[in-house]
């Protein structure tokens, strides 16, 4: 028997071979076995790139041609699709889900609403019928008006004028806030070219009431629905941790309230040196919560800090309550819970810049002789904001000789005043009350000036003093009826539960 051995290696050319393979002869096999052995020795797929023209090469060519012919004979033909097994029809829930997502005529039960083509039974309409009513919703934008909103919706001019008159009786039209949402219904009209009559309009122009306008037998009438509002302040407490500001912001305190709180507490203690991580801060801010769910947060009312053996409790209070829109408390001074207020510290610079000329005798850069420099010059960019360094009354606002545009502010009590010269623009007027940190003007180069800067000077008892290192303090105490009203207000604030808008019983 001849057997192929893939691992046999010829040496010296002495071994018998056929096509490079060693054979072993045997005569004990049947004809079928010998035929299979012979067929196994034949290489039916030789390399057509080698020994071109040999018998093995032609045998490989014949094999390749036979395979190509078989594929051609068994193929369905060019461009003919292959028939595949069809999917089973859907049943039950699977059919309902597929039908809901399908696109098909209404006659086939599709849920998409696609219409079928017209048949002989369809009669063409001369014109599309007009809807009997038309609902609309719109919001007022900046610079918008109630009349413009109704005009865009398609209401008639007479109805717009009537609505304006009705709403003007409830509040000024210019007090309707941007963002107010209007919902209404327009009625049937005689013909398409006519504007629609207004049937109903509803909107909330203010936090505590809603207006509804409806058409009745006598025309358009308005109904005002009051909305219950809870104005109990919101109280939030927490631990100072590594950062007092970050702790307050993480608890949900607005950034402006957190900044005002730190400014208030800083007038009594050192934020960096006195506050420990386990100290408890306490803040209250005004809040209005409507029965419809809207919430408005206002300004800070109370700032407290519990440092263990020492407590700081400051309350925002105004002596003249009629001048304040928020109950007389949001624009006042900080008072201790006992009814005293104290402002102390060192005078800061009223503008961001560097001191270019100090207080005292100097050679005037323009006049060319020695004279007293009654303040300090602060070099800064043209148009930089100038801030009031303390509360007071404006006693000069305008041009003042070599000072150019000038603002003078006199503190209430204590005989201290400040002056700001060489301004480019003045923002206050004579007799106006200003608060510490309020922008009163912008720096410039007016008057006898060699460049953009701010001249800043301080008076005490009518005499100029050096603004650098000038310290001030003032103490005021409430008495009589003002003190009793203040104590009542403090008790009401301290009765509020933290994190809620409900007072303790």
Image (cartoon, rainbow, N blue to C red):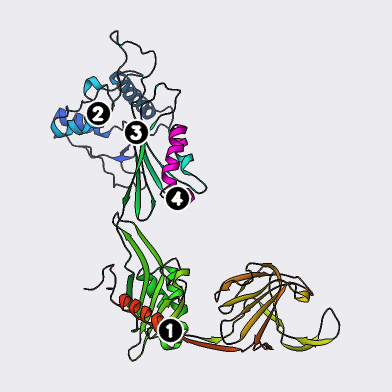
Magenta residues? 150-174
**Residue 298 x/y as whole percent:** 41, 66
Q: Above or below — where is 497 with respect to 476?
A: above
Q: Quick one: label 4 or label 2, which is nearer the N terminus? A: 2
Based on the displayed image, in which of its 4 quarters is residue 135 positioned?
top left
Question: In the rendered image, which residue does mark 2 sit on?
Answer: 111
Q: Which residue is mark 3?
A: 218
Crowd tier of the residue under label 2, counting other residues whose Cα lies within 10 Å: few below 14, some 14–19, many 20 or above: some
Instruction: Please name which of the two marks, 4 or 2, marks the residue nearer to the observer.
Output: 4
Identify whether 179 is placed above or below 23: below
Picture quarter with the N terminus: top left
Which one is earlier in the sequence, the residue at label 1 or at label 3?
3
Say whether residue 405 is left or right of residue 329: right
Of the residues under marks 2 and 3, which one precedes in the sequence?
A: 2
Between circles 2 and 1, the one closer to the viewer is 1
Return the x and y of residue 494 as percentages of the image width and height. 31, 78
Query: Camera-side residue: 322 or 181?
Result: 322
What residue sits right under mark 1 in the picture? Answer: 478
Task: Measure how far apart labels 1 and 4 are at the Cα level.
Answer: 39 Å
């Amino acid at each position: 028997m001849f057997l192929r051995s893939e691992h046999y290696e010829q040496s010296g050319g002495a071994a018998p071979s056929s096509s490079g393979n060693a054979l072993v002869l045997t005569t004990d096999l049947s004809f079928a076995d010998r035929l299979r052995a012979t067929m196994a020795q034949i290489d039916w797929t030789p390399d057509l790139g080698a020994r071109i023209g040999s018998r093995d090469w032609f045998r490989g060519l014949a094999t390749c041609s036979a395979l190509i012919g078989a594929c051609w004979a068994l193929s369905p033909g060019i461009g003919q699709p292959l028939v595949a097994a069809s999917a089973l029809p859907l049943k039950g829930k699977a059919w309902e889900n597929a039908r809901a997502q399908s696109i098909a005529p209404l006659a086939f039960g599709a849920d998409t609403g696609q219409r079928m083509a017209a048949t002989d039974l369809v009669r063409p309409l001369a014109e599309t019928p007009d809807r009997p009513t038309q609902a609309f919703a719109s919001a007022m934008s900046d610079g918008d008006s109630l009349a413009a909103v109704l005009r865009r919706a398609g209401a008639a001019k007479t109805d717009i004028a009537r609505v304006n008159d009705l709403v003007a009786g409830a509040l000024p039209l210019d007090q309707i806030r941007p963002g107010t949402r209007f919902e209404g219904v327009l009625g049937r009209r005689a013909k398409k070219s006519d504007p629609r009559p207004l049937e109903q309009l509803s909107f909330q122009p203010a936090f505590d009431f809603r207006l509804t306008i409806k058409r009745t037998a006598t025309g358009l009438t308005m109904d005002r629905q009051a909305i219950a509002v809870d104005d109990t302040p919101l109280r939030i407490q927490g631990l100072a941790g590594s950062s007092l500001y970050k702790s307050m912001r993480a608890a949900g305190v607005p950034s402006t309230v957190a900044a005002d709180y730190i400014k208030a507490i800083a007038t009594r203690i050192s934020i960096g040196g006195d506050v420990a991580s386990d100290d408890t801060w306490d803040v209250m801010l005004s809040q209005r919560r409507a029965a419809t769910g809207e919430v408005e947060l206002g300004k800070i009312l109370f700032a407290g800090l519990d440092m263990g053996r020492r407590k700081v409790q400051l309350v925002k209070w105004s002596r003249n309550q009629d001048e304040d829109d928020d109950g007389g408390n949001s624009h006042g001074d900080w008072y201790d819970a006992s009814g005293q207020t104290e402002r102390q510290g060192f005078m800061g610079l009223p503008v961001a810049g560097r001191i270019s000329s100090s207080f005292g005798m100097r050679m005037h850069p323009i006049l060319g002789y020695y004279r007293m420099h009654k303040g300090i010059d602060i070099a800064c960019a043209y148009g930089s904001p100038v801030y009031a360094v303390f509360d007071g009354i404006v006693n000069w606002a305008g041009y003042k000789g070599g000072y150019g545009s000038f603002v003078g502010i006199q503190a209430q009590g204590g005989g201290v005043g400040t002056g700001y010269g060489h301004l480019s623009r003045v923002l206050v007027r004579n007799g106006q009350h200003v608060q510490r940190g309020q922008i009163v003007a912008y720096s410039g180069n007016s008057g006898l000036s060699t460049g953009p800067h701010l001249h800043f000077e301080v008076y005490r008892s009518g005499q100029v003093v050096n603004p650098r290192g000038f310290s001030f303090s003032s103490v005021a105490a409430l008495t009589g009826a003002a003190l009793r009203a203040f104590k009542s207000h403090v008790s009401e604030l301290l009765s509020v539960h933290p994190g809620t808008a409900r007072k303790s019983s």
